Amino acid sequence: MVTVYSKPGCQPCRMTKRALDQRGIPYMAYDITENHDAFAAVESLGYRELPVVLDGDDHWSGFRPDKLAALGDGE
């Protein structure tokens, strides 16, 4: 299961979730402005840009079409 950390008003976050939806890739989304544990998780990974996407041991920040395409290839 893919995890997406995001916040309201974040265009790259919306684009990432839309791309996952279009590919039919299931994910859990967490709003870091409402969930302290989600905010702490993003901080612990050292990211300052959203969204932060986790797929197993792989993770990245920002809208990354290349990484999202690779998720679909592994399905």
Image (cartoon, helix red, strand yellow):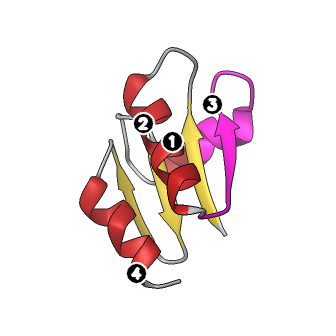
Q: CA distance from mark 2 to mark 1?
A: 5 Å
Q: Label 4: which residue?
A: 73
Foreground pick, 67 / 5: 67
- The amino acid type of the residue labelled 2 equals Met
Q: Quadrant of residue 36?
A: top right
Residue at x 74%, y 23% (from the top left corner): 34
Picture disc at residue 35 = none
As drawn, 58 above or below 31? below
Three-letter code for the amino acid on which mark 4 is drawn: Asp
Q: Determine which residue is flagged by label 1.
A: 18
Task: Say above or below: 32 vs 47.
Answer: above
Q: Residue at x 35, y 74 (%)?
A: 70
The spot of residue 30 in percent (x, y) is: 68, 40
Q: Residue furthest bottom?
A: 74
Gap in angstroms between the C-alphas marked 4 and 3: 28 Å
Image quadrant in which the N terminus is located: bottom right
Q: Are marks 2 and 1 in contact (CB under 8 Å)?
A: yes
Tell me where residue 60 appears, x and y as whole percent.
Answer: 36, 56
Q: Which range is magenta?
A: 25-41
Kind of element beneath mark 3: loop
- Report whether 66 appears left or right of 74: left
Instruction: Write down the residue under mark 3.
Output: 32
Instruction: Give the structural element (helix, strand or loop) at label 1.
Output: helix
The amino acid at mark 3 is: Ile
Q: Rounded to the nearest whole Å, what is the CA distance between mark 4 and mark 2?
A: 19 Å
Front disc: 3 or 2: 2
Quick check: can you spot residue 46? yes
Residue carrying label 2:
15
